[in-house]
Amino acid sequence: MMRRLLCTDLDRTLIPNGAQAESPGARARFRLLAGRDDVTLAYVSGRHRALIEQAIADYDLPQPDYAVADVGATIYRVKAGSWEILEEWEAQVAPDWRGLSHDALRDLVQISPALTLQEQEKQNRHKLSFYLNLDADIPALLERLREVLAREEVKANLIYSIDEAAAVGLLDVLPAGANKLHAIRFLMETKQFALADTLFAGDSGNDLDVLLSEVPSVLVANAASEVRALASAAQHPSLYFARGGYLGMNGHYSAGILEGAAYFWPEADGWLRAKN
Ligand SMILES: [Mg+2]
């Protein structure tokens, strides 16, 4: 049996939580596609596990077979509602942190009172997350953190953003090799999915590494114009731009994922049309 790996970002890709409207029935069609025995479903998100489970419940999303959480730092195998960390992935990313545990790295990088550890559910073995006081000199603090990490020979990505609503900075420290693209390649290699049988769907900046990789990908039609411009400038052969019109849908969110599936996988087009 032909096996396919369907990977999708969640926020504003599968989850219709953007400004644009969702086509009626699009998510129900997505559930049909994802529910097939020959389709393996992987969610690929910046969300941590609890927030992915929350989204599944809130938006009636299908249970995935895998969940790439924490922007690639953690991969879960999901089976009959139980979530297990993929130890092979942990082993693959651990050397970036020189094998240091979460708590050992926390002790190394907690160098300023402006850094406060986030809640336990937002931490993971290879995700160390802090709040940052916006009154602090943040560029200087990030520079000092980079120096500490370099001195300790820890290869980490520092992902800094601002939660405008809460007026607080957010800082994630992740293994340098842990990102959406590496996690998807890892699933393809270890679970034996060919490139032609893999599809990724995304909408935003942290999806670009996958959208512009060798992995066949679709950019949903509701993607921000900056992301669309960056992606189209690259003229990337394995990237499809959802535009709407497929089965009368608008190409936003799950409709865009389905449009991409039909473009790359002609059989999927047949399945979707047969259910119409
Ligand atoms: Mg998104």
Image (cartoon, helix red, strand yellow):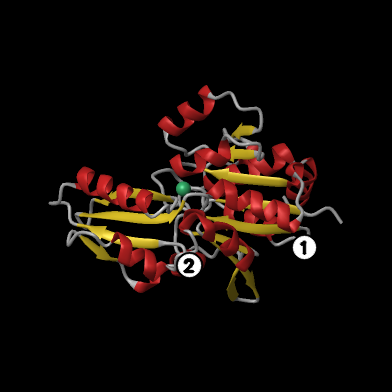
Is label 2 in a helix, a strand or a loop?
helix
Residue at image location 29% in from the left, 61% down from the top: 130
Disc on res. 60: none
Is label 1 in a helix, a strand or a loop?
loop
Label 2: few (<14), some or many (≥20) within 10 Å?
Answer: many
Q: Mark 1 points at which residue?
A: 37
Task: Give left or right: position of 255 versus 148.
Answer: right
Task: Residue 268: give x, y in percent of width and height.
Answer: 75, 47
The answer to which of 50 and 183 lies nearer the viewer is 183
In the rendered image, the vertical position of residue 192 relative to residue 54, given as above or below: above
In the rendered image, the vertical position of residue 245 relative to residue 4, given as above or below: above
- The reply to whether residue 251 is in sight is no
Instruction: Residue 262: name its quadrant.
Output: top right
The answer to which of 90 and 41 lies nearer the viewer is 90
The amino acid on which the numbered mark 2 sits, given as a three-letter code, is Arg
Residue at image location 34% in from the left, 61% down from the top: 129
Q: Name the residue under label 2.
A: 49
In this view, which residue lies farthest toward the front? 151
The answer to which of 156 and 253 lies nearer the viewer is 156
Task: Residue 14: give x, y in percent of width and height.
Answer: 53, 52
Look at the numbered disc 1 and say if its residue's Cβ is closer than 8 Å to ligand 1: no
Whichever of callouts 1 and 2 sits on the residue coming sooner in the sequence is 1
Residue at image location 45% in from the left, 55% down from the top: 46
Task: Give left or right: position of 260 versus 68.
Answer: right
Residue at image location 48% in from the left, 59% down from the top: 98
Q: How far apart are marks 1 and 2 (CA)?
A: 24 Å
Task: Residue 188: give x, y in percent of width and height.
Answer: 70, 52
Q: Nearer the viewer, mark 1 or mark 2?
A: 2
Label 1: few (<14), some or many (≥20) within 10 Å?
Answer: few
The amino acid on which the numbered mark 1 sits, given as a three-letter code, is Asp
Instruction: Residue 265: name its quadrant.
Output: top right
